[in-house]
Amino acid sequence: MGRTSDARERILDSSRRLMRTRGYTALGVAEICADAGVKKGSFYYFFDSKQALTVETVDGHWAEERRVLEAALAEPAGPVERLRALVECLIGTQRTDHSESGAIHGCLYGNLALELSGQEPQVRRRLAEVFDEQVGMVARLIGAAREAGLVGREAGADALARSMVAQIEGTVLLARVRNDPALLDEVWPSVERLLGLA
Amino acid sequence: MGRTSDARERILDSSRRLMRTRGYTALGVAEICADAGVKKGSFYYFFDSKQALTVETVDGHWAEERRVLEAALAEPAGPVERLRALVECLIGTQRTDHSESGAIHGCLYGNLALELSGQEPQVRRRLAEVFDEQVGMVARLIGAAREAGLVGREAGADALARSMVAQIEGTVLLARVRNDPALLDEVWPSVERLLGLA
């Protein structure tokens, strides 16, 4: 029991690490199993398909990221400072990647979103849910900033929150193409303009 | 001569159409050749590799898109109206896709940017150049809008232009995940906020 659940976790760890850098299609089950030190025959004991593994990979990545975000948001700070902490958490992974490996690998959800066609509907659905949760977290902070009179009421909180998440994803995309972490510094000034904070 | 150059064009046409919906890795040379009605053996007469084909696919797509954008920008209209026309051109393909095929396929450059790892440096470099050209077109319009006193001078024109391109790419990403063209309607209001137009 201990060993089998350990093998399952090792497959998920390898998938999470490899999928963000290699993508979905280019990454085979055999490669994941080799990285995890698990026999390929065991893979289908734990997962029905690569698609099923990918859904769980997204789940695991988001569970950890959400914990980090919620910890940042629990700090005793004003709503704008907490928005900034959230933005820094979301782009911090890219900065860490670049300083550790020399390459910006992009956001797991964004990478999968633009690679996968309509043939992996379960993954697509799960990605939509993760983005909804991110937008929801941002929208609550925008709501708090409004209560404090820091953000105007011209646009809906959900639309503003989506525009923020879109700005982060789009900037990470441009930073990945150039492999230039300096572009990430432009996210917060853009968010200030989107929210009318500047 | 007529026939061989025709085969080359057919390969490029098929690549352009298939790569945007299927991505890079999942799309094989054999499938492109079958779609183009060209023998696979002929492929390497015209192209050194799939990577070389992809660079030319990006070139061809951008050459046509740039023509459309330049035609829109040549209209006798104010800089903000021309910025809006440019935004509508860039997201119009997604609306057309959805109404014709029921699916938002995303932007060829954005899709490739987030799918490809560092192993296709020629494609990456070409994508960076295309994004630079888009940012340059937007920055010139922002410059004209500033001359007309319509956009403030707090942020550099290049940084503002990059934030606009990032906003478009990020929103297309979210619209693709949800397959929801209504999200595309949020691009222009976001751009108005980024530029301080609203």
Image (cartoon, coloured by chain):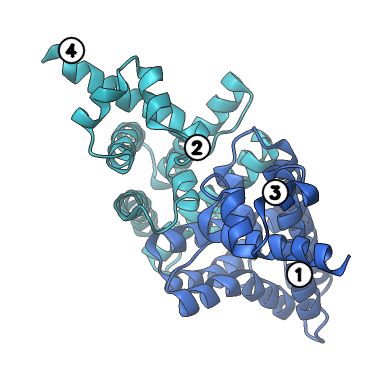
Chain colours: A cyan, B blue
Q: Is residue B23 left or right of residue B74?
A: left
Q: Which mark is drawn over residue B64?
A: 1
Badge 1 and badge 3 in a common chain: yes
Along the line of sight, the residue nearer the viewer: A182 or A7:
A7
Helix, strand or loop status at disc 1? helix
Which callout, 1 or 3, points at the residue further toward the start of the chain? 3
Residue that badge 2 annotates: A26
Residues under numbered marks 1 and 4 in contact, where contact means CB atoms less than 8 Å apart: no
Q: Is residue B191 left or right of residue A113?
A: right
The three-letter amino acid code for the residue at tag 2 is Ala
Along the line of sight, the residue nearer the viewer: B154 or A88:
A88
Q: CA distance from mark 2 to mark 1?
A: 30 Å
Q: List x then y, in percent, for residue A33.
A: 35, 22
Picture quarter with the N terminus of chain B? bottom right
Helix, strand or loop status at disc 2? loop
At horizontal 56% and vertical 55% (from top left) the residue drawn is B31
Residue that badge 4 annotates: A3
Q: CA distance from mark 3 to mark 4?
A: 49 Å
Q: Chain of mark 2?
A: A
Picture quarter with the C terminus of chain B? bottom right
Q: List x then y, in percent, for residue A49.
A: 28, 40
Which callout, 4 or 2, points at the residue further toward the start of the chain? 4
Helix, strand or loop status at disc 4? helix
Q: Chain of mark 3?
A: B
Q: CA distance from mark 1 to mark 4?
A: 57 Å
Q: Is residue A105 visible?
A: yes
Q: Residues within 10 Å of mark 4 (few under 14, many from 20)?
A: few
